[in-house]
């Protein structure tokens, strides 16, 4: 697996970073690509715009992310930026799933994730980006306790610069 990280301050900078990846032989030969956006931006239109840049350059790739109150790249903390992290899987696959905790409840979301994980041969990790909006994710995570220990479960909660219940998002 290869990893790339870019600090961007505009959609144009993000576009340039994504387009630079198309020229890399590693990305052309990749079995799967995972693009992650961590951004201080809370505007749905701009987030959709960023995701579209990636979708157009790398159709079918997994794209996910979260709003943040501070972004991290190569061990440094940034503010008011968008961090693009790209993971190039040379042999392994990568899938992105989304579950609404508020629709079914945390525990049911955890059960759905467990069923998906249990039926995914060769699974080695689950990254969770949760939008807690006043709720925790302990009930959802407790459902994953039955997974084999060799499956890593990691991630974090979406945040926003100001504590506004509707501002913190994962996408």
Image (tube, grey):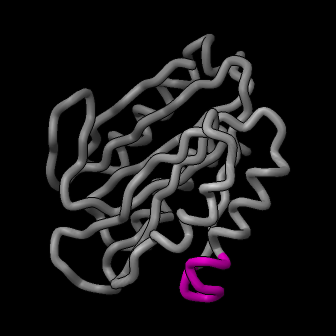
Residue extending furthest toward the top:
25
In the rendered structure, the answer to whether residue 39 lies left or right of residue 141 reads left
Classify 66 as above or below 104.
above
Q: Residue 138, percent across and down?
A: 46, 70
Residue drawn at (41%, 32%), measured in percent from left and top?
17
Residue drawn at (31%, 71%), measured in percent from left and top?
42
Q: Residue 139, percent across and down?
A: 52, 74
Residue drawn at (55%, 87%), measured in percent from left and top?
102
Q: Is residue 18 magenta?
A: no
Residue 44's image quarter?
Answer: bottom left
Residue 7's image quarter?
Answer: top left
The quarter of the picture where the N terminus appears is top right
Q: How many marks can you see?
A: 0
| Front residue of this view, candidates 122 and 24 | 122
Q: Residue 6, percent across and down?
A: 33, 33
Examine the residues drawn in magenta and state their main secondary structure.
Answer: helix
Classify 70 as above or below 2.
below
Q: Which residues are magenta?
A: 101-108
């Amino acid at each position: 697996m290869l990893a790339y990280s870019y600090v961007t301050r505009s959609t144009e900078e993000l576009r340039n970073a994504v387009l630079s990846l198309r020229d890399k032989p590693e990305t052309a030969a990749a079995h799967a690509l995972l693009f992650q956006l961590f951004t201080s931006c809370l505007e749905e239109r701009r987030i959709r715009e960023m995701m579209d840049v990636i979708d157009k350059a790398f159709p079918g790739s997994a794209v996910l992310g979260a709003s943040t109150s501070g972004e991290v790249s190569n061990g440094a903390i940034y503010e008011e930026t968008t961090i693009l992290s790209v993971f190039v899987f040379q042999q392994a696959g990568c899938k992105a799933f989304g579950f609404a905790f508020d629709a079914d409840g945390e525990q049911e979301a955890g059960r759905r994730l467990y069923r998906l994980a249990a039926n995914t041969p060769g699974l080695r990790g689950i990254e969770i980006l949760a939008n807690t909006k006043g709720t925790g994710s302990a009930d959802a995570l407790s459902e994953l306790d039955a997974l084999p220990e060799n499956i890593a479960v990691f991630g974090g909660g979406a945040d926003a610069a100001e504590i506004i219940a509707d501002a913190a998002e994962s996408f």
